[in-house]
Amino acid sequence: MSVLPFPSFLDDIKEKGARRAITDLVDETVTRVTAGLNVRDIREVLRGDAPSRRPNPRLTPHADAFWMHMRPSYYHASVTGVYPTLRLGWLTTYFFVVEIITGMFLMVFYTPSPLSAYENMLNLLSNVPFGQLIRDLHRLGAEGMVMMVFLHMLRTFVTGSYKKPRQFTWATGVILLLTTLILSFSGYLLPWDQLAFWAVTIGTSMAEAAPPEIVGTNVNLLLRGAPDIGAGGLLRFYLLHVFALPLITIIFIGVHYYKVILHGHSLPPGEDEVGTDTAKRVPLDRRTYFLPDVLTNEVLWIGAVTFLLIVLTVWFYHAPLESHADPQVTPLHTTAPWYFLWLQAMLKLGDKVFFGLVIPGLLFLFLLVYPYIDVGKSRRYAHRRLGLSLSMLAVAGFVVLSWMGSPEYGVETSGDQEVAQALAPMEGVGPLRSVPFEQLVPGVYSTAAMDDADVAAALTARFESEGRAMDRFTVSPVPADAPRLLGLMEQFDHLFDVWGANMPNAWGQLMIRDWQPGLRRVEIYIEWDRPQIDEQGEIIRDAEGNIQVVLDADGNPERENSGKAIYISAESGYFGGGH
Amino acid sequence: MKIETKIILGTAMFFAILLMVGWVVIKEESRMAEFTTQFEGRSLERGATVFESNCSTCHGRQGQGSGRAPALNNPRLFNGERLAEMKWAGGLFDYIENAIAAGRPNSGAYWPEAMPTWGQTYGGPLRPDQIQDLTRFVMNWESSALDEANPPTVNQDFILPGIREEGDLQIMASGAPVGTAVTFGDLPAGDPARGETLYTSNELGCSSCHLGGVVAPNTVGTAERAAQRVASDPALAGYTLEQYLVESILQPNIYIVPNEGSAVYSAGGISIMQQNYSDRIDAQDLADLVAYLLGQ
Ligand code: HEM
């Protein structure tokens, strides 16, 4: 006997021989680690054999191990296929875990201060191995999670899974929808680029509109930490994003999932008698055990989705990073993230308070209590025509509103600005910057001459007779070895068909100049006949709808013009597909 | 699906993921280098934009300098002479970055206006990243400035405060500024040769703006143009040619030459030309300048 208070391994060897002692030790260790399965049990699990011991050792971990006790030991065979869950709740959880893991990496390289946040992003992209990959994964995962939550909600609605007894599961789900959206949105500000700054400025300005004024002002102050977003706002959003919201989300996922297990996954709508719920009473022959079937399924799904995510982030998707946040420069079109476009559309409809706060608030409340209102007993599709039509209507409404929220819809801008923006957007690349540097041959090119040397010469002569500054109006044809430049000029010309409705006789020109070694200045210049404007600022038209233009003393139309200059460096690599 | 199939598929997936991560490992070095190059290129573009809107009125659109500020495409900035004369021990990038961010708040003593402070860190309007963009932009003149076969146009050299060389011009020798109330009739006789020296001097810097007609109306043809303006523009009714020139120098805002072509002479009714010559020259200096301009 050993003098130690527990039997020692050496004693075991003495007693059983080395070989037996070692296998016993391994077996015991494995049993402890898996909280109940020994080596043989695991082998059986992996082979798909039935358990050879009684009581079934595969159930022990569900009782004894922390993580496993959260999972049921068996499912109803009717809910383990792709239908009816479509794995959407699971996928949401998966993305949430991806966010937590990638988020922790990002935190290491990030300081929430306007002085360093943007620089941290650049450092992440230029100096940290895997920095771009992790950032892309985090961003794509966030989009994925939002998408999955929406779809998951839609599926639980469609299969009627919100009905008794799962009303509360649904209600916690609605809270999760909200935290997911805010989680994603609060992450938006952190890179401190223009996109971030303006999307969040617009978003929080809604809080400011909350009546009465004293509430709005203070909620706004609470969120932004100052009247405008700055260091205080960034810190607050950061703390919400990395601490408060994940915590709330984790707690509610816990409650949500607890309820899911408590009531059992709802069976496909046709399987239950109307008004009954047998999800928890699973006949012996309908049981699918977590070990091994569900577990291996999930591992396979993890592999497949991770594979897909990595393919996307390595070759196809890169998280956007615009220029540094600048409170002085409002980008031409600021848009909310896609999942808030519907809200942006509502704001276009009218009153900020009513459409931006009251309606969304009521909508949220309605979703929260919907299962308690819709007390129809049947979950069968055929019995729920009204509810299902309502959900399809809601989806259609979401799509239409999202479109209305996009900048294409109903925003008053002037055509000349739109043309210049379409060629060389304030943020991002656009067609002008995509022309290879060597094809941006210095010279003046006109949409009225393109690559025709004679027309260009005639145009130049006309400009000279009009007494224009000839350094800017000596038009040349687009050189033959610059096909991309010619393509750009054609696009420029075509843009007048799209945006030129209020710009009679419009043409444009590009003036490209060498400015510094490897740096060119490109000026977009647009000219058109000046329309007559009435007191309301509306353009005056004749009976046929033709625009009336302002004439000068000689009876010629007065011309109006606008311009915009950008610089392009040979190094920027816009052409090489840089983003 | 059979368990074996799932296990095989899962393992295959796992290796595929490893392979892709391996691919990232191989590409990562060059990707980061490429990002850095592209980033610097875009930084240059932003720098050029900020320079155009904030700096070009003083330093010239192409950095060639003007009467208000020294050229920044100056070979002396890049060949070490300027750093040596300023006794700057660090590198050029830091020198330029520092000059832009901190400005030269005391340089108003020897320039018409001081080089403003630009960096937010020192109370200016621009963020640190914008200062870096500008610095990259100024640094990018290096190769063209040092190109001896094709030297750049430098309109205005640096000025060192307090150092006057032998035989230097004596501006405002009488010690009494002319003020703005003077008319041509009150002036002594002018000397066009001395006028030219004054006009091209660093202290007054007239020619650095007026040379070539980029920032300001060209020196060449001044008298002829002035005569035309006086004769044809109703705003100048009753002026003599000489009085027009006197007023143009002492109070540029009263009559502002309209912008020509791409040249912008004024903004919001304020001429780019300094408003303080009436304090910086005396009656003799003014008479000499006018005598010189009448011959142009
Ligand atoms: C972070 C967000 C969420 C997570 C992680 C999550 C997770 C889950 C999971 C894993 C399930 C198990 C069944 C399945 O995979 O479909 C489930 C079921 C359910 N979820 Fe969610 N969910 C979330 C948000 C929501 C939302 C927004 C709603 C609806 C408003 C919702 C309503 C439900 C309902 C009613 C069930 C029961 C379905 C059934 O028993 O068939 N959940 N959830």
Image: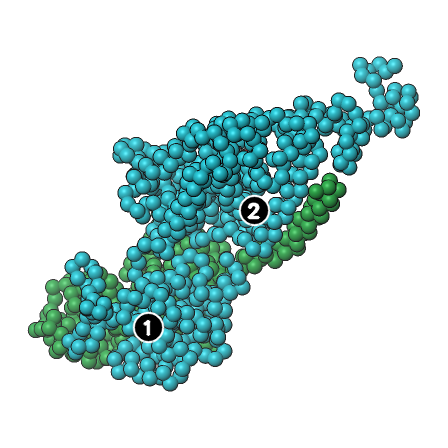
Chain colours: A cyan, B green
Badge 2 element: helix
User: Quadrant of the image for the N terminus of chain A?
Assistant: top right
Image coordinates of residue A54 in percent, x first then y, are 77, 23
Badge 1 element: strand
Question: Where does label 1 land, which residue?
Answer: A507
Q: Nearer the viewer, residue A530 or B86?
A: A530
Q: Which quadrant of the structure image shows residue A416? A: bottom left
Q: Which quadrant of the structure image shows residue B103? A: bottom left
Chain letter behind tag 2 = A
- Residue at 67% from the left image edge and 26% from the top image edge: A62
Q: Give the left or right position of residue B237, taking residue A53 as reference.
A: left
Give the mark nearer the N terminus: 1 vs 2: 2
- Residue at 58% from the left image edge and 28% from the top image edge: A279
Q: Give the left or right position of residue A498, taking residue A44 as reference.
A: left
Image coordinates of residue A85 in percent, x first then y, are 57, 38
Q: Which quadrant of the structure image shows residue A560? A: bottom left
Q: Give the left or right position of residue A127, taking residue A185 as reference.
A: right
Chain letter behind tag 1 = A
Image coordinates of residue A146 in percent, x first then y, are 49, 42
Looking at the image, can residue B278 be seen?
Answer: no
- Residue at 88% from the left image edge and 26% from the top image edge: A20
Image coordinates of residue A475 in percent, x first then y, are 36, 79
Question: Where does label 2 land, which residue?
Answer: A137
Picture layout, residue A331 above or below residue B57: above
